Image (cartoon, helix red, strand yellow):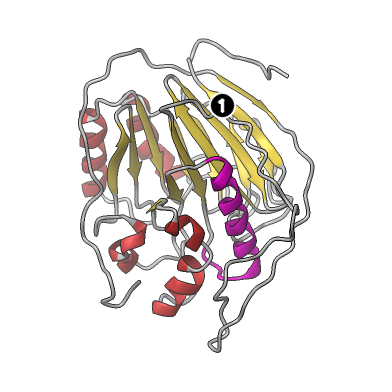
Amino acid sequence: MVGGRGWSLRAPARRARDHGGAKRRRVWSASAGAATALLFVFAVSLAGCPTAIPEFAPSDIEADVKLPQEDGSLRFAVMGDTGTGDSAQYRVAGLMAIYHRAFPFELVLMLGDNLYGGEAAGDYERKFEVPYKPLLDAGVKFYASLGNHDDRPQRLYEHFNMGGELYYSFSPAEDVRFFALYSDYLDPEQLRWLEKELAESTERWKICFFHHPLYSSGGRHGPSLELRDVLEPLFVAHGVDAVFSGHEHFYERLLPQNGIVYFISGAGGKLRAGDVRASQHTAAKYDDGRSFMILELAGDDLHFQVISGAGSTVDLGVIGNRDKITQDPR
């Protein structure tokens, strides 16, 4: 809740641990799955916003999880550009809840533009608390980064777990650390903080997430070249493995750049259909509908699956050892 009803300034827990092991990178991927229709029923309050979680017709859709679900793995989801408060956002949110029952991810990375338009208490409720209520009730933690449509006070909202900061890092498991950046205003202080955090991180996996993509084949925006000039050298120097961004309202996976795999997942609420102009950097794309990602970190492998708003798998693969490429085993 907001407006004095549950603000939290507690920073996400951080654990420093020493883990050896060489850097790694391999990627295999496949696109598969057939579209599945969804049926939603909304209850509307007197205030005119949905107050009930979307209901699905019996046997309307089943989660088709293609990730290994190994014991002891870290499972998480990624979504971006979500905060519209409209039926499209609720559709994807309901689908995420279905997948969570079959693939119980413990956290969600938010890639910015979390609340479009107003940011009053009712907006937090309509654009976040209501659509993601099943996940919140199940104990899933959301970790937000801010986009160009987000106001800075979002950093104080308890369910975004930003610890009152515009940028932060956290380690939910002993072999991985996530770094959330504020790409809308990347000042020298933030860059010094990032370099220090990356240099001091002893986790085997280093994953960054923020709003504006360093690489993009989008026709509307395209890559953020100024950000790339200052961020990518730090990522390469300190062994960042993967980077997740939003801003573009589609999904795109880029071919590894300097050993780093970049993802764009900005269609959790908004959509810019047909906007990907496939380039030399494009490994996979989906701009026909909305989408979100589920991922599993198991040892030296980061498995990923991209789910469309219709329930189909539109990209699938694994990031692993740098010197090996494993093809689709099917």
Quick one: 322 or 318, which is closer to the camera?
318
Picture layout, residue 313 above or below residue 82: above
Query: Quadrant location of the C terminus?
Result: top right
Kind of residue at disc 1: Pro
Question: Badge 1 local density, few (<14 within 10 Å), some, or many (20+)?
Answer: few
Q: Give the x, y percent position of residue 264.
A: 55, 44
Picture layout, residue 314 above or below residue 235: below
Q: Give the x, y percent position of residue 309.
A: 68, 53
Q: Give the x, y percent position of residue 161.
A: 31, 55
The residue depicted at 33 percent of the width and 13 percent of the height is 21
Query: Quadrant location of the N terminus?
Result: bottom left
Residue 88 sits inside the magenta stretch: yes
Label 1: state its secondary structure: loop
Picture layout, residue 108 above or below residue 147: above
What is the quadrant of residue 159 in the picture? bottom left
Q: Give the residue at mark 1.
A: 68
Q: Residue furthest front?
A: 58
Secondary structure character of the magenta stretch overall? helix
